[in-house]
Image (spheres, rainbow, N blue to C red):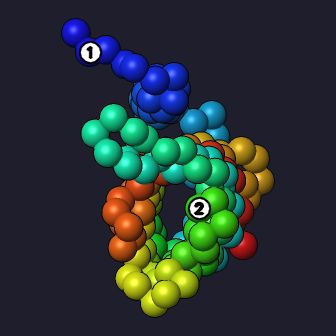
Amino acid sequence: MIRVKSKKTLTALSVVAVATVLAVSMLIVPALAGEADLQNKHVGIKAKGFAFKRIDNETIKQYPIELELTAELGERNSMRIPVLSANGTVDVNGMVYTIESGAGMVFTGRHIALIRCTGVDADGNEVVLGIGAVYFWWGGSMYAFRAKAVLKTADGPMLLLLRGAAKVY
């Protein structure tokens, strides 16, 4: 049996559990509408959430996070759409990381997007951002999503739990 000694750790574990349940439910429930035409388009992505960073074996810190990305999508190939490039910013508790490049894939049949980005922090150190998102159509050219991501920085990795919207231009 695992004993949790602090309320912060219990809260962090609860958030992770709820996010996992929601992500699984988004995979099971099909979207109510068909996919919009997404090929050769730009997508503006905005999300907010929380970053969790392990300080030691018993301490996990929680920080607010804001994500803004612009992604360019390639030509649809059956049930896949490649993400050709991505750039933007990640703001973790006032520390801004600049995303310079990225690539990935959108799997339209399963409503999943996977993106891997690289960038730099304010000191010029390399950062890597890996995002896995479950999305659904929100109407028109808007999509809502929930994402789990890992941000690897010089200070160590952080788990990111995000909710946001993406608009196709």
Q: Visible in this render: residue 151? A: yes
Query: In the rendered image of this protein, does residue 24 appear above or below residue 67?
Result: above
Quarter of the rendering containing residue 83: bottom left
Q: Name the residue at the top extreme.
A: 1
SS for callout 2? strand
Image position of 76 (left or right of 89): left
Q: On the picture, is 54 further left or further right than 73?
A: left
Residue 40 in the image, given as x and y percentages of width and height: 56, 79
Q: Is residue 128 above or below residue 21?
A: below
Q: Nearer the viewer, residue 23 or 99?
A: 99
Instruction: Report the residue that reaches farthest toward the left.
Output: 1
Q: Which residue is mark 1?
A: 2
Q: Are marks 2 and 1 in contact (CB under 8 Å)?
A: no
Determine the residue located farthest toward the right in the rendered image: 140
Task: Where is residue 85? Give x, y as percent.
Answer: 48, 82
In the image, which disc is placed on residue 18? none
Alpha carbons under labels 2 and 1: distance apart: 30 Å
Residue 103 vertical position relative to residue 157 in the rendered view, above or below: below
Residue drawn at (63%, 34%) of the image? 32
Three-letter amino acid code at the position of disc 1: Ile
Q: Which residue is mark 2?
A: 92
Number of other residues with Cα within 10 Å of mark 2, as a class: few under 14, some 14 to 19, many 20 or more? many
Give the residue drawn at x 54%, y 44%: 62
| Secondary structure category for the residue under label 1 | loop
- Which residue occupies the foreground of this view, 167 or 127? 127
Residue 112 seen in this snapshot: no
